[in-house]
Image (cartoon, helix red, strand yellow):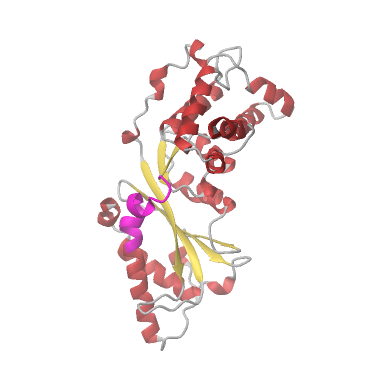
């Protein structure tokens, strides 16, 4: 009973996750029904042959569906509008909508062979990203005076990217950092109201860290990014950036990070262990005085050196 109503909510621009929750339907069921509808009347098909942009977008969507994370109807519409605006920036929005949403079957276009959709992710460069909160004054016995979130990204080859650190506050303050910043020259620092990631910080991480530092020699080569289902990873801006740069997203199932998240199982546990030790040593030296943000950065940097080893990363 709830499935038709949930599908209608998705067709009106809602997300599959919200529709599944509101109408008590499994998300996988909705994705299956939505995919059946796409096959019967595929969007992005004009009365002419696909353009290169349409082929690329169609393939990206279908591969994402195979990975279990297809974009929503609303997101696809906005993706197409982005793509069309880049090619024809002065085209009116109504014209865009009319030209994008056609009902011609994709199967009639010989330029989209079904075998192209059978993409093996085993050969893709694979990266895993996750976030975790760290207390600035959490030592062996526990002392909390503030918090910061850090995001880590590692590759299946055992390499890692410089971390973005998100402090709690209105803006990043100069007094939070030591005079010598050479150790943190490639780190990214920002602040949010609650100290956790936001839609904006997720996009900034993609633009400033992940995309430029994992760029393959061949721009058409695909990358696979494994991450949790945080809402900031499902926004139109985040997913469209991934589409533009041939990055495919694989989300872990809800409530399974403690079992399936490679970073949680290997890197983060070791990182937090070494961080607590570093803070504990510092507390002994400073007679248990509170640990400020400068000391937090120092302790975290040393803990990263100990925890982010090739063996630890590959062990996940």
Left-right relation of 135 to 22 = left
Q: Quadrant of the N terminus?
A: top right
Q: Please tell me whether residue 156 is drawn above or below residue 264 in the rendered image.
A: above
Residue 110 position within the rendered picture, expressed as x and y whole percent measured from the top left: 47, 11
Nearest the viewer among 17 and 299 is 17
Residue 311 position within the rendered picture, expressed as x and y whole percent measured from the top left: 25, 55
Nearest the viewer among 129 and 66 is 66
Q: Is residue 60 magenta?
A: no
Residue at the (37%, 25%) spot, across then down: 118
Left-right relation of 150 to 72 = left
Report which quarter residue 269 is drawn in. Answer: bottom left
Residue 138 position within the rendered picture, expressed as x and y whole percent measured from the top left: 42, 75
Magenta span: chief secondary structure: helix
Magenta segment:
253-269
Report which quarter residue 126 is drawn in. Answer: top left
Residue at the (35%, 64%) spot, across then down: 271
Left-right relation of 262 to 11 = left
Report which quarter residue 276 is drawn in. Answer: bottom left
């Amino acid at each position: 009973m709830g499935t038709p109503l949930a599908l209608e909510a998705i067709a009106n621009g809602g997300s599959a996750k919200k529709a599944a929750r509101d109408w008590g339907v499994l998300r996988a069921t909705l994705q299956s029904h939505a995919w059946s509808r796409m096959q019967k009347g595929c969007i992005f098909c004009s009365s002419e042959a696909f353009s290169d942009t349409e082929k690329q977008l169609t393939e990206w969507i279908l591969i994402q569906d195979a990975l279990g994370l297809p974009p929503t109807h609303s997101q696809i519409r906005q993706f197409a509008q982005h793509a069309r605006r880049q090619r024809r920036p002065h085209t009116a929005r109504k014209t865009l909508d009319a030209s994008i949403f056609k009902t011609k079957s994709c199967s009639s276009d010989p330029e989209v062979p079904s075998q192209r959709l059978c993409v093996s992710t085993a050969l893709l460069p694979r990266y895993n990203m996750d976030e975790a909160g760290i207390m600035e004054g959490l030592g062996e016995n526990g002392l909390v005076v503030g918090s910061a979130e850090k995001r880590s990204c590692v590759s299946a080859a055992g390499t890692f990217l410089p971390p973005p650190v998100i402090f709690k506050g209105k803006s990043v303050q100069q007094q939070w950092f030591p005079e010598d910043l050479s150790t943190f020259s490639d780190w990214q620092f920002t602040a949010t109201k609650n100290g956790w990631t936001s839609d904006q910080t997720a996009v900034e991480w993609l633009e400033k860290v992940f995309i430029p530092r994992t760029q393959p020699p061949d721009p058409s080569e695909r990358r696979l990014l494994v991450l949790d289902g945080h809402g900031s990873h499902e926004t139109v801006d985040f997913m469209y950036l991934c589409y533009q740069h041939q990055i495919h997203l694989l989300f872990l199932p809800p409530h399974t990070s403690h079992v399936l998240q490679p970073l949680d199982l290997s890197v983060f546990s070791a990182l937090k262990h070494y961080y607590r030790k570093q803070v504990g040593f510092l507390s002994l030296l400073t007679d248990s005085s509170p640990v400020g943000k400068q000391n937090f950065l120092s302790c975290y940097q040393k803990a990263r050196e100990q925890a982010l080893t090739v063996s630890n990363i590959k062990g996940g």
